[in-house]
Image (tube, helix red, strand yellow):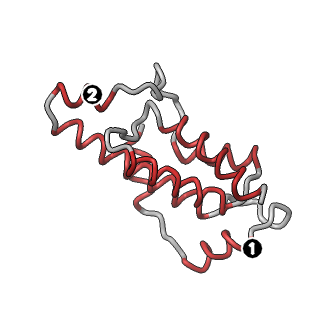
Amino acid sequence: MASSSASSSCSLAISPRKLRYDLYSYSYKEDSNTPLVINVLASLIERSMARTQRIVKNCSSALSKAISTNIFDCREIPDMTIQSYLERIFRYTRAGPSVYVVAYVYIDRFCQNNSGFRINARNVHRLLITTIMVASKYVEDM
């Protein structure tokens, strides 16, 4: 699941002009496409998950068990790619593209401040919806 979506996001061509437009001028009425920022966020999260998989694979079994079990983890891995999950959140919440940038900043800061926490397939969906909700409150309620 993650390897096929990770390979598709590697071929993502990022246009700075399109990204800037999405962040500052995106309109739900005029644009029916998903903003580029959603694709970028999905790609960054998938890279982080791939890095976690490499760490777990290269570590001892005791350390990998400590990394892989977390109170934030789901019992079962959701059957939805990061890309499709973010697109679904975008479609139903109508949160602006800047919310997703702020959500990524929150994820990055959380991971930096909690060195034992690793993004993986069991916690990524919960982490995304939580940070997007908090970022939405911060960005759109100002």
- Kindly identify the residue that appears in the image at 75 percent across and 73 percent down: 25
Kind of residue at badge 1 = Ser
Give x and y (percent) for residue 116: 32, 39
Q: Nearer the viewer, residue 71 or 122?
A: 71
Using the numbered discs, state the Cα–Cα distance from disc 2 to disc 1 in whole angstroms: 44 Å
**Quadrant of res 31:** bottom right
Q: Quadrant of the N terminus?
A: top left
**Quadrant of res 32:** bottom right
Q: Looking at the picture, does residue 49 appear above or below residue 9?
A: above
Tell me whether the residue at label 2 lies in contact with that at label 1, contact meaning CB atoms closer than 8 angstroms: no
Taking 72 as reference, is 51 left or right?
A: left
Give x and y (percent) for residue 22: 67, 69
Q: Nearer the viewer, residue 9 or 136?
A: 136
Q: Residue furthest top?
A: 75
Q: Residues within 10 Å of mark 2 (few under 14, many from 20)?
A: few
Give x and y (percent) for residue 57: 20, 36
Q: Give the secondary structure at mark 1.
A: helix
- Kindly identify the residue that appears in the image at 58 percent across and 61 percent down: 101
Q: Quadrant of the C terminus?
A: bottom right
Q: Which residue is mark 1?
A: 25
Kind of residue at badge 2 = Ala
Taking 51 as reference, is 40 left or right?
A: right
Q: Nearer the viewer, residue 88 or 68?
A: 68
Q: Which residue is mark 2?
A: 66
Taking 111 as reference, is 104 left or right?
A: right
